[in-house]
Image (cartoon, coloured by chain):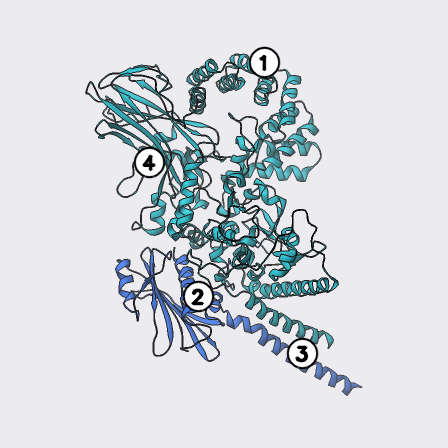
Chain colours: A blue, B cyan
Amino acid sequence: MENSSMARKGRNLKWLVQCAALAAGLLALPASAHATNNCPWINEATVSGLLGADATGTATGEGAGQPGVCTFVAQREGATHTLRLAVEIVPDPHARVGELAHLCASGTAVLPAIGNEAVVCENDKKGALGERVVGRVRDQVFNITIASTQKHDPLLDRSALKTRIAIAAEQVSGNLF
Amino acid sequence: MKEYKAILLLICALTASGAAAGMAQQPPMQPATGSTPPPPPPPPYTPPAKGAPPAVDTPAQRDALAAWEARAIKKSEDDRAAHNAAVTPAYNFHYGKGNPYTPGNIQVVGKGFIQPGAFPTAEYCGVCHQEAYSQWRQALHSNAFRTPFYRTSVNLLIRDKTRGIAFARFCDSCHNPIGVLAGALTEDSKVDRARFDADGLTCMTCHSVLKLDSTNGNAGVEMGVPAVIVDEKGNRIPGQVSFDQILRHPERHSQAVMRDLMHTPEFCAACHKANLPAPLNDYKFIRAFTAYDEWQQSKFSQRNPLTFYTADFTTCQGCHMKRNPISLPDYGAKNGTLVSHRWLAGNTAVPFYYGFTEQLDKTIAFLRAGNFLNVDIFGLKKADSDQLIAPLGSTAYGLAPNDTVEAYVVVQNKNIGHSLIPEVRDLYEAWVEFTVKDANGKEIYHSGFLKPDGMLDPRAHSFTNRPVTNEGAFVDNHKVWTIHSVAYDNTVPAGRSVLVRYQFRMPAEATGAVTVTAKVNYRHLRQSYLNNIFGKDHPAYPVVEIASRSRVLKVGENNPEAADPSDNADWMRWNNLGIALLDQLQYQESINAFTEVIKVRPQYADAYTNVGLTNIVWEKYDSARTAIRKALSIDPNSARALYYDGLLQRRAGNTEQEIADFSKVVEMFPQSRDARRELGITYYQQNNNTAAMEQFEALQKIDPDDLTAHYNLSILYRRMGKPEEAKEQQAMFVDKKVDPGAPTYGLNFLRAHPEISTESIPWHMHSDIDNKAGGPQNGK
């Protein structure tokens, strides 16, 4: 009886440990997917929506002539989706927007009603698709890129990239106002 | 063992539903601009014939709907539980676990935060309501959150070192209710904001409101779990359903999304009335804006017997949601028309910024078309003469070369159902631009011009206010939580008028003439606020001329001339002058003006009442009695005259007649806050506690912030053995009464700003002419 009871207790304990481990694992999923937000201009949950998968982000603050940078990465069906943004305060922000727009692979188009001014352009690199938005809110210049490592990404095709970077730009510029 | 398995299953279920919730929360992925391509045609639909009974479901259809309903409820609950599991642990319950949305008053049915995916998207609604969708997309409601004009303001609150994002729930409860209810407004937000930020007040925010929480404003609503259809018993089915379900049962769709309360002004009051509560400003209750109360006190509500003029009953919706022909398919249209979902009003800045030209054009047309204001160059006074030459156009007069002339410009808030300017009047700008030009078009005098940097002439007569901090600094950037007082408020209440005086000199030539023009201009927003948002390098925002009037004044004889079609009749012109002078504390002149009304319309009872009112304010009670008696002899049922008679009877000690007067007014106008208040005071003075309480309680239902009601009820409840209620009323009185130290903050501001301090003086003049002391005669 005692052995049987101990065995039952042991099985219960094993179940408990398994459950706890599973529960911890399951509960940890959202926590790892949306860890503490450090990026002041857009949160991980929003970027996850834009990139189509749980994104993890890193952020470095602005300082000593260096822009603040947030980088978010998400993996989805063999593709790596990235959203990167940088924000800097400069004395001649309009000129700086022009400078950064020169990073574009092709010509720029005005992105209306984003910040004081903003332009959008294609930003493809080595077979990967990308879009870039450069704009400003007062003297704060932002530079956002969104990209997929797959050239024929079913989720982030050219049209989706354009739409999603516009949403990202509105989020970022809104938080800069 | 079973418990462990149950826990495990629950965790698995929560995780799975969390994934479902995550899918449900995918953003619409359409940038919210005006260039969104038009949606495909709506599904085919033939509306039922008028009076036709609703479709009867077959048993199979009933079963299918029941199954759908069960799945929808389960999904909604599971998604919500998962959402709460993700959001709650990191949420900043700054005001306690039980107050997740404080300082806003918004509430939602059910437990905890609600997932953004619970709200059917505007695009979904827009499939069948294309006209409403296209209007809404350009309107203020859809852009309530995302605009730079709002974000700059709310970001200041979020970045404030002693406050933060939790405090922004106060603003976002109206500007971004899904964000608030979803628990997105916290430092470490776990919510995908792309889902709702760009849609502000989306269809299913307004169309999910089930209940209004009195008329306290600050988003005082209870929202239901969004549903676009009810079952045959009227139970709400959460979430989106297939269009064929809706088209088969439009009556059930209507039951889910339309409620009678949506047609009431109280519905609008939920967000178009706001106060700054102590939890926000760490100070005290301060009334922020009261568009609803202003409407209630206007002639359009027919609830106030004391208005100077009368009008047909018109709600907020009556002006701002007019029915118009549709140009896109919309199954909500009736006879080819739909109530406007543009909510046209005064905001030109948002459509200007977003390039919504249709909204901008219609807004400008709205501002100009409503006969909202009347501008009257009413009279002239020559220097060293007290004679008022008036009304111009109806009287002959002569002017000599070099005459120094004072022009009386009367601006009447004629048909706005609220004040000019309403709401956040520290942000908007309406002012009088007054010009005097000689025969060659050369400017002799100009007040109310815009400077090259876009700033308004500081000495312009502006219908604005100046909120100040406890250090007397102007709150230029809408940091409302720092407002402690108002240095002055030059807005014009609904139905009232203001007199603006300008002094200038006629030309020296014997045959000279001048053209005098007075315009009321409107700009959304003040230039310095635009500069706060964008810096100084932004395009000029539209200035809209709402109303104007010109007159030619000749050196020599001026004869009467035909009136403009937009001119008021002479009796009304005198009446408006009388009202303006009364508000500027010029009692004798006011009585003189009202007496001119009597000359033109001797049987117009209100003219005598106006004389009586002015005498009451002037504390000339015998003269007031004579005038009020005359008014009542013409119109014994004039509620307005009876009200003032009640005041005079009180003064004379005729309590029975006082009660009879006020009772009759209350009977005719049960929602008259003034009559309820005075009748309550009368009963209180008679120690009739029950009757007094009844009046003050009724008054509180009309105006929950009435100080007299709070004060008297605190005493009456104590007398009646209700200590808790008494305590509550006392606390509200203490919180809402004016801080006796606050006026000094305004004075500090005025001392530091002599260039505009005269605007705080009711009786002042605008002039560039140097007086003997060498300065302009502002404040003469």
Q: From the viewer's perspective, is B421 left or right of B707?
A: left
Disc 1 with disc 3 on a shared chain: no
The residue where tag 4 is placed is: B752
Determine whether the residue tagged by mark 3 lies in a helix, strand or loop. Answer: helix
Q: From the viewer's perspective, is B515 left or right of B55?
A: left
Disc on res. B633: 1
- Marks 2 and 4: in contact by CB < 8 Å? no
The residue where tag 2 is placed is: A38
- Marks 1 and 4: in contact by CB < 8 Å? no
> How far apart, in angstroms, are the residues tagged by discs 2 and 1?
75 Å
> How far apart, in angstroms, are the residues tagged by discs 1 and 3?
91 Å
Q: Quadrant of the C terminus of chain B?
A: top left
- In the rendering, at what x and y percent does residue B662 appear? 63, 23
- Mark 2 residue crowding within 10 angstroms, few (<14) / some (14–19) / many (20+): some
The kind of residue tagged 1 is Ser
Residue B403 visible from this viewpoint:
yes
Q: Nearer the viewer, mark 2 or mark 3?
A: 2
- Residue drawn at x 49%, y 17% is B611
The mark that comes first in sequence, 2 or 3, is: 3
What is the chain letter for disc 4? B
The kind of residue tagged 3 is Leu
